[in-house]
Image: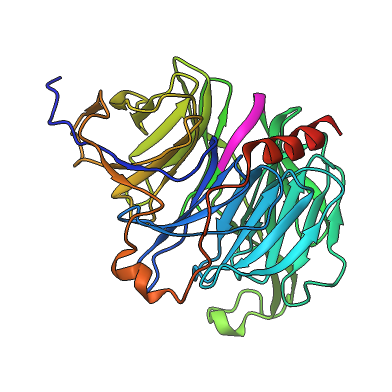
Amino acid sequence: MDKKKVVAPLVCHGHSRPVVDLSYSPITPDGFFLISASKDSTPMLRNGETGDWIGTFEGHKGAVWSCCLDKHALRAASASADFSAKLWDALTGDVLHSFDHKHIVRACAFSEDTNLLLTGGFEKILRIFDLNRPDAPPREIDSSPGSVRTVAWLHSDQTILSSSGDAGGLRLWDVRTGKVVQILETKFPVTSAEVSQDGRYITTADGSSVKFWDANQYVLFFLLHWNKNVFNSVSCHSLHCILTYFFTSSFGLVKSHELPCKVESASLEPKFGNRFIAGGEDMWVHVFDFHTGEEIGCNKGHHGPVHCLRFSPGGESYASGSEDGTIRIWQLGPLGQIEDNSTANGSTTANASDGMGEVTQKIDELAVSETKKKEETQVDGVEQKVVDA
């Protein structure tokens, strides 16, 4: 197939160590935003469209493994190797609350209604914090088979999904009972799990495989009682019966694609669902056809393994985070266009010291770094202590 013109990515500098997680906010009246987690201990907030740096959240003393924004982009959350998860004011950069844990926290996620924060990590415990009562003890679900790697909410906060860094499979929990209702089997540990924007699919990456699972909810109705004398009535409203219903999901495997290298992260295009991206140890960002698994694009430019990938909420671009400490924002070409960004030469950049731009100016004095990152030895020291614990 003929190659189309090369579209250079936007390269976002600022982190001094590997970028390990990325998360977009939904589209808000002020646009949409991108938050990144890094081993340098400082999550960063950016304009999701331009990559312009908005600010840095300072307060963690160890690597930050996970980060997220609530649906209004007013609050952020982060999970760290310093045995804590933090809730931040995304407008000012202030710490609103710090949730102490007894071991490394690897994952965090806001509930859809933004009232709850879910965390998981090396303790093998899922915790649900009530953000309206942040000082209250969290609810704990403690039957994870190993350290928790990823967490997410689905089905209007009725279901939790989690994966383990020590065992294959994706576990689905009923929030009401705290019990596992289903395990989606995978051969290797799931390193990335994403619920699609419309809630239809769960996208997972394990080993060299990207899988898509049916997450649709179906309504089942049951007739519990009827009146024999009027059961044959022609008029539906006169049928004397009692109906009950409940929601269920099949969670069946929809697609599974084997890729030529180990995959760390994958994300499904949110608007049409016809393409997905995947990246991993080969340092490239690959674009695939959802239906056939055919590779239709390859983005080269990172100088280390790709740890995280996410589509923007409108699907017009996607971001990648790498071992090289950079974030790259790639534009998604029209359907059928082959993307082959074989070089980073000529890439535009968005540095942490660049001007803030129009959306940034609307944000009221977000706390920014007055000095360079904390001494590398200090961060490494904390992280090494935690890992050895």
The spot of residue 73 in percent (x, y) is: 49, 67
Residue range highlighted in magenta: 186-193
Does residue 30 show up? no
Decide if residue 227 is on the left or right side of residue 287.
Answer: right
* Residue 17 forms part of the magenta stretch: no
Q: Would you identify the image quadrant in which residue 168 lies?
A: top right
* Colour scheme of the rendered structure: rainbow
Q: Would you identify the image quadrant in which residue 148 lies?
A: top right
Farthest bottom residue in view: 238
The spot of residue 266 in percent (x, y) is: 48, 35
Identify which residue, 238 or 47, lies in the foreground: 47
Decide if residue 196 is on the left or right side of residue 151.
Answer: left
Identify which residue, 354 or 57, lies in the foreground: 354
The spot of residue 233 in percent (x, y) is: 59, 79
The spot of residue 291 in percent (x, y) is: 36, 32
Position of the C terminus, as image quadrant, is top right
